[in-house]
Amino acid sequence: MIRFAPRLATAVLGSAALAAALALPASATGHHTPGKHHSPIVLGAVQADSPGHDDHSNRSLNAEWVTVKNTGNRPVDLKGWTLTSDCTHKVYHFRHLNLGGHKSVRVHTGRGHDTARDVFQNSREYAWDDHRDTATLRNAHHHTVDTKHWGHPHHNHHSHR
């Protein structure tokens, strides 16, 4: 029996190494993109072009929004996080927002009172280019967590509202 022990140990260790190698690709897949900080917080739906006439009213400004979603089970404190437009260079700074597990919040452009489901940039100008833009979400350590692109490259980079 003792002479089989080295073979048995080799077989067990080999099986463990194979199982670990097979498990690695499964855990490495998902929303993680090279160059981005892995997080359960992601950008969701975007309404970059408010419906109707762009008249700069607060109603029109608030019809422009970006959704930030927590895909994880645990709440995440977004204090110090930022949401930035590449085209307009507008930056929204999150304050005291604890985003619960599997919850989302809409970041509206106009003025309003922040709640758990809606926060407001308090801007009097549109934050997003409705033809082509990129929203960039960064954590409190300034690491890029997620980006969302929209539009077509043949459009002018800056819209004239």
Image (tube, rainbow, N blue to C red):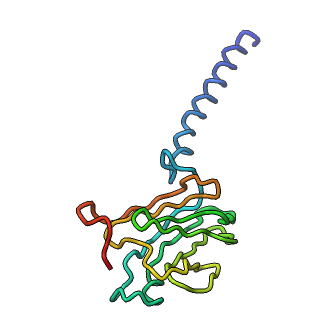
Q: State the residue lying farthest toward the left.
A: 154
**Image coords of residue 25 (percent x, y):** 52, 40
Location of the C terminus by quadrant is: bottom left
Q: Residue at x 48, y 89 (%)?
A: 58
Dividing the picture into quarters, in which one does residue 22 lie?
A: top right
Asked if residue 123 is positioned above or below residue 148 in the image, the reply reads below
Q: Which residue is nearer to you in this view: 19 or 62?
A: 62
Asked if residue 108 is positioned above or below residue 13 in the image, the reply reads below
Asked if residue 7 is positioned above or below residue 95 in the image, the reply reads above
Asked if residue 86 is positioned above or below residue 20 in the image, the reply reads below
Q: Which residue is nearer to you in this view: 32 or 95?
A: 95
Say how many tags the image has.
0
**Image coords of residue 98 (percent x, y):** 69, 70
Location of the N terminus by quadrant is: top right
Dividing the picture into quarters, in which one does residue 133 lie?
A: bottom left
Q: Is residue 20 left or right of residue 160?
A: right
Q: Is residue 85 left or right of residue 118?
A: left
Q: Residue at x 45, y 71 (%)?
A: 45
Q: Residue at x 65, y 18 (%)?
A: 10
Dividing the picture into quarters, in which one does residue 73 lie?
A: bottom right
Q: Is residue 132 left or right of residue 13?
A: left
Q: Is residue 134 left or right of residue 104?
A: left
Q: Which residue is nearer to you in this view: 87 or 17?
A: 87
Q: Residue at x 60, y 79 (%)?
A: 117
**Image coords of residue 143 (percent x, y):** 58, 52
Q: State the residue lying farthest toward the top.
A: 3
